[in-house]
Image (cartoon, rainbow, N blue to C red):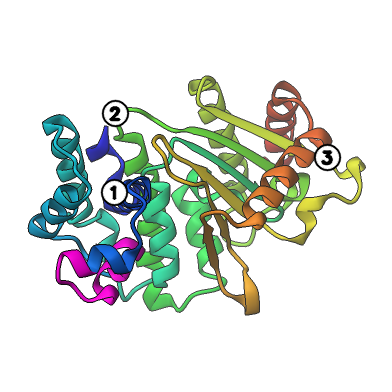
Amino acid sequence: MASDQGPVVQSALLRSELVKLRKAKGLTQEQVAKALEWSPSKLIRLEGGRSSITKTDLDALLNEYGISSESQRDRLHALNRGARSAGWWNAYRGQVPSGYLNFIGYEAGASFIRAFQSTLVPGLLQTREYAEVLTAQIVDPMELSSVVNLRMQRQEELARRSKLPRRYFVMDEAVIRRHVGVKKDPGIMPRQLEHIANVIEEERELVTVRIIPFQAGAHAGMFGPFTLLEFEGDLSDVLYLEWGPEGTEALIQGPDERVTDYAASFESLLEEALSAEESLELIRTVAEELS
């Protein structure tokens, strides 16, 4: 399973386990560093993910923590090999923000993806033509192809996983009502909505889409879109805010109360949303109206 999660998640899983092993022995970072004749900053960087872990360093840590089980050592070394591999998204470095690529690295290994959108179709559900019209509004024409290709590859790579993640999307009705692309081709938005409906019907066990109708009034999602990622293994949930502090994206992980707050907000949004069946019916109806 480890190799199916991608290098970002494998690295996070490995670092989480190493920290737990150290704490289980009752050791501080300073004590371990001294025993291994390392500088304390080296261990801090390794545990914090700011430096990669070599095979030699991993063996040294496992020996220090008294890990003799061959199966456990092999599993951790497998995680480390995966963590040191290159993610497919690295091809886009320098073309899109690094924070966004880091999010994609976590998304690539998530077992459960929950997302709310107030104005746009979620990236994992977008058609290429919808993505092109949308992206053209906010990026330089020279960057358009890279951004759209990345979005499409996210979908393709996720579909290749041996164990597909659960995906749960909640959208405001405004998302499906806005006739995106009408000036270029009036059929773009109807085809986008048909695509969403087809995905729902083809992957009912894995994909759920719920619509919050206009008549629901004000709701917690009006303050902006967000995505919550859950993982198999002992790894904390990750929260991604597309418009974080000072207008930039924010990736929040670990024991941060904001992760819990947004998880609670997602549940409150479900209370305002139509059922999955009613949402599918509304999507089909709006597609016909826009055709």
Per the image, the residue denoted by label 3 is: 213
Given this view, does label 3 or label 1 mark the residue nearer the observer? Answer: 1
Q: Is residue 32 left or right of residue 229?
A: left
The residue pinned by badge 2 equals 162
Residue placed under numbered mark 1 in the picture: 14
Circle 1 SS class: helix
Q: Say what amino acid the circle numbered 3 marks.
A: Pro
Which residue shows up at 18% across the image and 64% down it?
A: 35
Q: Which mark is residue 157?
A: none
Using a 10 Å C-alpha cutoff, classify the residue at mark 2 as few (fewer than 14 neighbours), some (14 to 19) or many (20 or more).
Answer: few
Q: Residue at x 77, y 41 (%)?
A: 269
Q: Position of residue 287 (x, y in %)?
A: 67, 37
Q: Residue at x 67, y 44 (%)?
A: 263
Residue 109 placement (x, y as % from top left): 37, 43
| Residue nearest the viewer, comparing 191 with 63 | 63
Residue 76: x %, y % from top left:
20, 42
Point out the tag, 3 or 1, that comes first from the N-terminus: 1
Q: Are marks 3 and 1 in contact (CB under 8 Å)?
A: no
Quarter of the C terminus within the rendering: top right
Mark 3 lies on a secondary structure that is loop
Amino acid type, residue under disc 1 in the picture: Leu
What segment is highlighted magenta in the picture? 34-49
Badge 3, how many Cα within 10 Å: few under 14, some, many 20+? some
Marks 2 and 1, how far apart at CA: 21 Å
Q: Give the prevailing secondary structure in the magenta stretch.
A: helix
Of circles 2 and 1, the one toward us is 1
Q: CA distance from mark 3 to mark 2?
A: 35 Å
What amino acid type is highlighted by mark number 2?
Ser
Badge 2 marks a residue whose secondary structure is loop
* Alpha-carbon span between mark 3 and mark 1: 43 Å
Depth order, front residue of 11/105: 11
